Image (cartoon, helix red, strand yellow):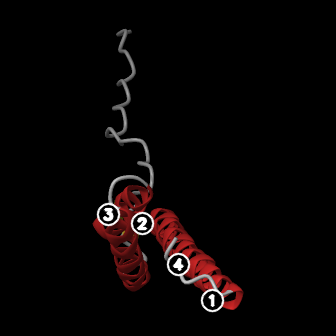
């Protein structure tokens, strides 16, 4: 009687574990970042120019993000830039209007009182 060992079974071929799903990388819009930066500059260093630039770049960024929704991100940044820009423009317009009305009203009052402005 011969001691014969049963043949060893061959292991199955190596299989890699299932990989995680691959999602496309979404880039943040450069115009959205620019809009936010200009909106902040509109409140600090470039009062009117920064605000106008923030509004223009914000609208362009939102259009770009809507066109390329699958690959572009940054809608929140664009909205923040728009809010900062429009609010600074609104406050500037209201301030100019208040100054004009104040000095215009003062001139009308002085004219009604007969004061010529020459003291």
Question: Which residue position is annotated with label 2?
Answer: 73
- The residue tagged with tag 1: helix, strand or loop? helix
Drawn side of residue 2 relative to residue 77, left or right: left
Sooner in the amino-acid sequence: mark 2 or mark 4: 2
Compared to residue 21, the image places residue 12 above or below, namely: above
Q: Nearer the viewer, residue 85 or 65?
A: 85
Question: Which residue position is annotated with label 4?
Answer: 117
- The residue tagged with tag 3: helix, strand or loop? helix
Q: Which residue lies at the image location 33% right of the left edge and 60% below the top edge?
A: 46
In which image quadrant can residue 8 be found? top left
Residue 34, horizontal then vertical, whole percent: 32, 63
Q: Nearer the viewer, residue 19 or 114?
A: 114
Mark 2, mark 1: which one is toward the viewer? 1
Sooner in the amino-acid sequence: mark 4 or mark 1: 1
| Alpha carbons under labels 2 and 3: distance apart | 14 Å
- The reply to whether callout 3 and callout 4 are in contact (CB within 8 Å) is no
In which image quadrant can residue 55 be found? bottom left
Sooner in the amino-acid sequence: mark 3 or mark 1: 3
Question: Which residue position is annotated with label 3?
Answer: 34
């Amino acid at each position: 009687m011969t001691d014969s060992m049963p043949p060893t079974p061959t292991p199955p071929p190596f299989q890699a574990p299932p990989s995680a799903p691959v999602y496309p990388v979404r880039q943040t819009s450069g115009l959205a970042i620019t809009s936010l930066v200009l909106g902040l500059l509109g409140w600090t260093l470039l009062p009117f120019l920064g605000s106008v630039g923030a509004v223009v770049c914000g609208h362009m960024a939102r259009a770009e993000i809507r066109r390329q929704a699958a690959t572009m991100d940054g809608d929140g940044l664009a909205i923040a830039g728009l809010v900062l820009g429009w609010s600074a423009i609104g406050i500037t317009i209201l301030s100019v209007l208040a100054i004009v009305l104040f000095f215009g009203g003062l001139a009308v009052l002085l004219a009604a009182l007969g004061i010529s402005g020459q003291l």
